Image (cartoon, rainbow, N blue to C red):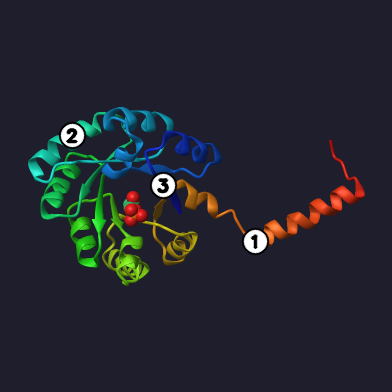
Amino acid sequence: MKFFVDTADVDAIRELNDLGFCDGVTTNPSLIAKSGRDILEVTKEICDLVDGPVSAEVVALDSDTMIAEGRKLAKIADNVVIKLPLTLDGLKACKVLSGEGHKINVTLCFSANQALLAAKAGATYISPFIGRLDDINIDGLDLIEDIRTIYDNYGYETEILAASIRTVNHISDCAKIGADVITAPANVIKAMANHVLTDKGLAGFVKDIKAAGIKIL
Ligand code: G3P
């Protein structure tokens, strides 16, 4: 399973990249706004840092302007993935830009039918938002499962990029279902290393090390 880091915070990306936990990056207008940086400048810096795909989202709502913005974003670096919203205009832009050979991440997906349209429009990635469905009492993981079934039924190569990940359990559940990629905030990815029994076991070792005066160096 590939791990993308869902942030425009360059330091957080660098830390996870050094650990080998960053196969790519996703950004969106909210994350860019949070970084307080210029979208073109910060996207370039992230693309230089990371070998994998870096999603950069258009800001227009009409397909013609989305296409122009997408072409501009794609010029930043070879690893830019153009991120488009799942609207009819977004799908139109997806069809045109994917036809030109650009990689596309179709975002804000909340239904299996939307995911089916994105695949037909040539999306490289589809981003279903798990957490935001959970927020309204709809099981976001059911959507991942449905899209997996539909894509496998027809051999669509669009990768399922599970987004709006809020918990470590979302990540292991997505892995069990067979999502191709998860994108999550850096703190959620790092929290995967935590276990209360690891902490408890280590505390016991530390106590015994001190008592016995065990040294290696
Ligand atoms: O990847 C999409 C993500 O940035 C949205 O997450 O937690 O705002 O629903 P959230």
Q: Determine whether, in the image, residue 16 is placed left or right of residue 144.
A: right
Q: Residue at x 47, y 39 (%)?
A: 12
Horizontal relation, residue 130 to residue 67: left or right: right
**Amino acid type of disc 1?**
Val
Residue 133: % across, % down: 31, 65
Secondary structure of residue under mark 2: helix
Residue 151 lies, with reference to residue 104, above or below; the image says: below
| Residue 96 image point, x, y percent | 13, 44
Q: Element under label 3?
A: strand
Graded by Cα atoms within 10 Å as few (under 14), some (14 to 19) or many (20 or more), the crowding at tag 3 reads many
Q: Which residue is mark 3?
A: 4
Say whether residue 100 is visible.
yes
- Toward which corner of the image does residue 59 lie, by quadrant? top left
Residue at image position (17%, 53%) is 121
| Disc 1 versus disc 2: nearer the observer | 1
Type of the residue with mark 2: Arg
Within the image, what quadrant is residue 115 found in? bottom left
Q: Earlier in the sequence, mark 2 or mark 3?
A: 3
Residue beneath the point at 9% across and 45% down: 62
In the picture of the structure, the residue carrying the numbered disc 2 is 71
Question: Which of the two residues, 186 or 86, is positioned nearer the viewer here?
Answer: 186
Q: Which badge, 1 or 2, is on the more N-terminal residue?
A: 2
Of mark 3 and mark 1, the one earlier in the sequence is: 3
Q: Which residue, given by chain and number where applicable, does mark 1 sit on?
A: 196
Question: How crowded is the residue under tag 1: few (<14 C-alpha within 10 Å), some, or many (20+)?
Answer: few
Q: How many marks?
A: 3
In three-dimensional space, the C-alpha distance between marks 1 and 2, rounded to whole angstroms, equals: 48 Å
Which residue does the image show at 23% across and 33% down from the upper left? 73
Where residue 1 appears, as percent x and y from the top left, is 46, 54
What is the quadrant of residue 100 in the picture? top left
Residue type (three-letter) at the residue carrying disc 3: Phe
